[in-house]
C-alpha cells in the first residue's frame, strides 16, 4: 500500500517531507510553499510536484496525508481545508492559536471521517518511550509533583519574523518550546485533569534584543506556571528563549511519585536525551539508567503513516493537542491578568467533545 503524502510549508515542513520520502510505503507527491527557492530545492531533492498555493495543491495532488507546517495562525484554516479535501492531517505544534480553534479542527476531522495528529514529537524519542512504559507499569506509584522545563540562554528563533509576532505565533517560547515539555509531562502523568493555573510571563530580554537589532518583538521571552490537578498533584512549567542561565539549551522533565521518580533531560546542551528512574527498594536508593539501543521508537511521521496503513490508533491526537492548548491559553490568561485561572468543567467537556 502506497500512501500519497504532501506537505504545506517548507520551513519545519522539510523534516516532514524528508521523513515521508524515506518511508517504503509513502510517496511524497507534492509540497507547497510561497518561497520559490524552497520549492525549487524540494523539486530537485525529492522529484515531487511543487505549488505556490496550498489551495491549488489540495485540489490537484489528491494526497492521502497532508502535513501542515506553517506559522501557527495558519494551522486551523489549512488543516480544515486539507481535511475537507479528503486527507488525513499531521499538523505541527501547537494545534492552533487557541483551544477554540483546535476544537474546531477536531470537530471537522470527525465530521470528515479523517485523522488529525499533532506533531508533539518529544513523545517519540527512545528515552521517552522507555519512561512511558515504566510509568505505565507502575514503577513510580502515584505521581504527585513534577517540573518540566525548556530554557535557552539566548535562542530567539527568527527574530523579527513570524515567531516573534504575537498575531502570527500566538505567543513566544511557551507556545513554541513549552508546548513540547508540557505535553511530555502530561503524557507521562496519564493526563490528569487540571483545576487551576497560576502563571507569569516577561519579555525584558527579548524586547531589549529586538530593539538593539531594530526588529519587532511582541511576545514573551520567558513564561512560568504552576498547574494543579484534580487528584492533588502539581506541575511546574518553564519556557524561555532568553534567560540568564549557564546552559545554552536546558531541557528537563522531572516527575516525583510515591514509589519512584524520573527525569528525561538533554545531554551536553544538545538534542540527545537521557532517561533515568530513581527508587527506594528495601531502604536502598537505586538509580536506574536504561541503556541504548532503546526499543525502536518511530518518528511521528512514520508512526502516523503506519497507523493509517495498519488501521491502528495513533498517538498525539487532535484531542491531545486541544488539552495542551487549553493549558497554554490559561497560562497566558493568568500571566496577563495576574491571577489564578480556574480550568472549568465547561472547558473540559468542550475538549472531550472536540
Image: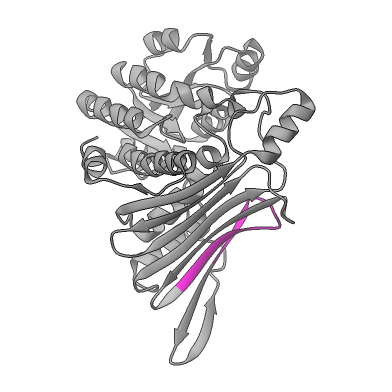
Comparing 332 with 32, the one in front is 332
User: In x, y percent, where is residue 151?
Assistant: 63, 50
Quadrant where the image shows the C terminus = top left
Q: Is residue 136 left or right of residue 290?
A: left
Q: Is residue 195 left or right of residue 22?
A: left
- For the point 43% across and 25% down, the residue is 75
- For the point 36% across and 64% down, the residue is 233
Comparing 292 with 338, the one in front is 338
- How many numbered badges does the structure rendering display? 0
Using the image, determine if residue 13 lies above or below residue 128.
Answer: above
Q: Furthest-front residue in view?
A: 338
**Residue 193 visible in this rendered orientation of the protein:** yes
**Residue 134 visible in this rendered orientation of the protein:** no
User: In x, y percent, where is residue 106?
Assistant: 28, 31
User: In x, y percent, where is residue 24?
Assistant: 46, 35
- For the point 31% across and 22% down, the residue is 83
User: In x, y percent, where is residue 251?
Assistant: 60, 54
Secondary structure mostly seen in the magenta stretch: strand
351 in magenta: no
Quadrant where the image shows the N terminus = top left
- For the point 40% across and 61% down, the residue is 234
272 in magenta: yes
Residues rendered magenta in the picture: 261-275
Q: How is the structure coloured here? A: one colour
Using the image, determine if residue 126 lies above or below residue 75.
Answer: below
Amino acid at each position: 500500500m502506497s500512501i500519497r503524502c504532501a506537505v504545506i510549508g517548507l520551513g519545519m515542513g522539510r523534516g516532514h517531507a524528508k521523513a515521508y520520502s524515506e518511508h517504503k510505503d509513502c510517496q511524497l507527491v507534492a509540497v507547497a510553499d510561497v518561497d520559490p527557492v524552497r520549492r525549487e530545492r524540494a523539486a530537485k531533492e525529492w522529484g515531487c510536484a511543487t505549488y505556490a498555493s496550498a489551495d491549488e495543491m489540495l485540489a490537484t495532488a489528491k494526497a492521502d496525508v497532508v502535513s501542515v507546517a506553517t506559522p501557527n495562525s495558519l494551522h486551523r484554516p489549512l488543516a480544515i481545508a486539507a481535511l475537507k479535501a479528503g486527507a488525513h492531517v499531521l499538523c505541527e505544534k501547537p494545534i492552533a492559536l487557541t483551544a477554540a480553534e483546535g476544537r474546531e479542527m477536531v470537530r471537522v476531522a470527525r465530521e470528515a471521517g479523517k485523522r488529525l495528529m499533532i506533531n508533539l514529537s518529544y513523545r517519540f524519542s527512545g528515552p521517552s518511550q522507555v519512561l512511558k512504559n515504566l510509568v505505565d507499569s507502575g514503577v513510580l506509584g502515584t505521581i504527585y509533583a513534577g517540573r518540566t522545563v525548556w530554557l535557552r540562554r539566548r535562542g530567539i528563533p527568527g527574530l523579527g519574523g513570524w515567531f516573534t509576532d504575537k498575531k502570527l505565533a500566538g505567543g513566544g517560547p511557551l507556545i513554541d518550546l513549552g508546548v513540547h515539555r508540557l505535553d511530555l509531562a502530561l503524557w507521562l502523568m496519564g493526563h490528569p485533569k487540571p483545576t487551576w493555573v497560576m502563571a507569569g510571563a516577561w519579555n525584558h530580554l527579548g524586547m531589549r534584543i529586538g530593539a538593539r537589532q531594530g526588529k519587532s518583538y511582541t511576545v514573551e521571552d520567558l513564561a512560568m506556571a504552576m498547574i494543579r490537578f484534580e487528584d492533588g498533584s502539581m506541575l511546574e512549567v518553564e519556557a524561555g528563549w532568553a534567560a540568564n542561565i549557564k546552559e545554552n539549551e536546558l531541557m528537563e522533565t522531572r516527575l516525583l511519585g510515591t514509589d519512584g521518580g524520573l527525569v528525561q533531560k538533554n545531554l551536553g546542551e544538545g538534542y540527545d536525551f537521557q532517561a533515568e528512574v530513581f527508587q527506594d527498594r528495601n531502604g536502598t536508593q537505586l538509580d536506574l539508567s536504561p541503556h541504548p539501543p532503546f526499543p525502536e521508537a518511530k518518528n511521528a511521521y512514520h508512526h502516523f503513516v503506519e497507523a493509517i496503513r495498519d488501521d491502528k490508533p495513533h498517538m498525539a491526537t487532535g484531542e491531545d493537542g486541544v488539552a495542551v492548548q487549553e493549558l497554554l491559553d490559561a497560562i497566558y490568561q493568568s500571566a496577563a491578568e495576574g491571577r489564578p485561572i480556574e480550568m472549568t468543567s465547561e472547558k473540559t467537556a468542550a475538549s472531550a467533545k472536540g
